[in-house]
């Protein structure tokens, strides 16, 4: 088992402990040996998946891929921790009635945000004026409830490198 898969499993245990029945776990197995595990948090847009190569963290359609060969494991853990314990700002961009772009950001300080991801479509009425709608989603878990467990996962990641 690779380091990102072990960290994912530890994160899954953390979420199961703190969210209980609100955590949905789905495992896909294929004949060629490919396996992916998907975690979704019921009544939210937050999801996490892990396969043989990477961890993907998402909120709705927006998501970011983290490959341990190219990405720092501490960044993965920090982004996941922030996604669960910080408020999110979601900005939808419209041309007419068409939502052509959606940006998800995580609050990292007083009125400071870090972008998780932006997604957009190519087919939209570009000639119409742009309107923005901004939504905020509250944190899922209080930071103090999981800080010890997150630090353990970070320490494990540092030892595994």
Image: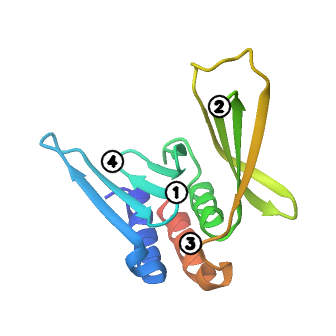
* Of marks 3 and 1, the one in the foreground: 1
The image position of residue 45, as x and y in percent, is: 52, 57
Mark 2 or 1, closer to the camera:
2
Disc number for residue 45: 1
Q: Position of residue 41 (x, y in %)?
A: 46, 66
Distance from Cα at disc 4 to Cα at disc 2: 40 Å
The picture quadrant where one finds residue 37 is bottom left
Q: Which of marks 3 and 4 is nearer the N terminus?
A: 4
From the viewer's perspective, is 139 left or right of 131? left
The colour mode here is rainbow
Crowdedness near tag 2: few (<14), some (14–19) or many (≥20) residues, C-alpha within 10 Å: few
Front residue of this view, candidates 63 and 101: 101
* Residue at left offset 12%, top offset 42%: 31
Foreground label between 4 and 1: 1
First reached walking from the N terminus: tag 3 or tag 1: 1
Q: Circle 3 sits in a helix, a strand or a loop, which is it? A: helix
Residue 59 at x, y percent in the picture: 55, 52
Helix, strand or loop status at disc 1: loop
> Regarding mark 2 in the picture, which secondary structure is present there?
loop
Residue holding disc 3: 155
User: Disc 4 and disc 1: Cα gap in Å?
Assistant: 24 Å
Say what secondary structure mark 4 lies in. Answer: loop
| Distance Cα–Cα, label 3 vs label 1 | 28 Å
Quarter-wise, where is residue 38 in the image? bottom left
* Residue carrying label 4: 52
Between 130 and 88, the one lying in front of the other is: 130
Task: Say whether disc 2 or disc 3 marks the residue closer to the N-terminus.
Answer: 2
Coordinates of residue 85 in the picture (x, y in percent): 65, 71
* Residue 32 vertical placement versus 90 (above, below): above
Q: Which of marks 2 and 3 is in front?
A: 2
List the residue tagged with mark 2: 97
């Amino acid at each position: 088992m690779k380091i990102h898969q072990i960290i994912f499993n530890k994160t899954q245990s953390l979420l199961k402990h703190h969210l209980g029945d609100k955590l949905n776990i789905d495992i896909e197995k294929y004949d060629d040996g490919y396996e992916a595990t998907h975690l979704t948090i019921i009544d939210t847009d937050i999801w996490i998946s892990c396969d043989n190569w990477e961890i993907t963290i998402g909120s709705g359609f927006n998501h970011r891929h983290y490959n341990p060969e190219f990405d720092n494991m501490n960044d993965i853990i920090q982004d996941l921790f922030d996604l669960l314990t910080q408020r999110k700002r979601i900005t939808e961009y419209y041309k007419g009635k068409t939502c052509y772009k959606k940006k998800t950001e995580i609050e990292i300080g007083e009125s400071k945000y870090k972008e998780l991801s932006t997604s957009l479509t190519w087919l939209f009425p570009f000639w119409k004026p742009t309107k923005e709608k901004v939504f905020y989603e509250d944190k899922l878990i209080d930071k103090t409830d999981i800080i010890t467990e997150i630090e353990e996962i970070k320490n494990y990641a540092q030892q595994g490198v």
